[in-house]
Amino acid sequence: MWKHTLLIAVAGLLLAGFSMQRSQTEKSVTSAPEVSLLGKTLSGTVMQIVKLKSALPEDDLLARAEERKPQFQALPGLLQKFYVRLGEEGSYCGVYIWDSAESLKSFRESELAATIGKAYEVTEAPSIEIGDIMFKLRD
């Protein structure tokens, strides 16, 4: 139930135009030496939202996500990943919950992160937002 609630909350934030200031290096998935928000180094649990547009039909996109699922499940520090369909056709979002900024940084420097664009046939630069999770509603 909490997963459903979190998904609804994240989708609501996205649809409401929620945005966080991000550093200059947030323009690519893999290019940041440290993870910061509003000039502060992140600590604790971190949420990363990657919005992208894909040329793939949804069934193909889902098939590729399933193929890559074991690689994401094996990532150290990735507590959860949500795959979200946004309102506009071909628009999707990955919502990652990381145990720490260090785990997020390691992922961003990985081959897996570097292959996201090609794997999902991304048609333009993704939008990436990162935030420090202050507290959670449910355990």
Image: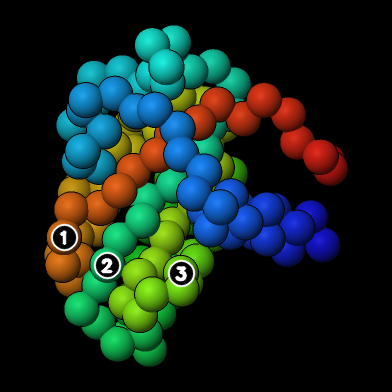
Where disc 1 sits, the SS reads loop
Marks 1 and 2, how far apart in space? 7 Å
Earlier in the chain: of badge 1 and badge 3, it is 3
Q: Most extreme residue toward the front, as rendered?
A: 16
Q: How is the image coloured?
A: rainbow
Q: Is residue 114 above or below residue 76?
A: below
Earlier in the chain: of badge 1 and badge 2, it is 2
- The dot on residue 86 is 3
Q: Which residue is mark 1?
A: 124
Q: Nearer the viewer, residue 135 or 105?
A: 135
- Measuring 49% from the left and 49% from the top, which residue is drawn there? 17
- Residue 123 in the image: state x and y as whole percent: 16, 67
Judged left or right of residue 25, residue 132 is right
Where disc 3 sits, the SS reads loop
The picture quadrant where one finds residue 43 is: top right
- The dot on residue 53 is 2
Q: Tell me whether the residue at label 2 lies in contact with that at label 3, contact meaning CB atoms closer than 8 angstroms.
A: no
Q: Is residue 88 above or below residue 74?
A: below
The picture quadrant where one finds residue 109 is: top left
Judged left or right of residue 64, residue 138 is right
Other residues around mark 3 within 10 Å, as few (<14) / some (14–19) / many (≥20): some
- Measuring 68% from the left and 60% from the top, which residue is drawn there? 8
Marks 2 and 3, how far apart in space? 10 Å
Tag count: 3
- Residue 73 in the image: state x and y as whole percent: 49, 55
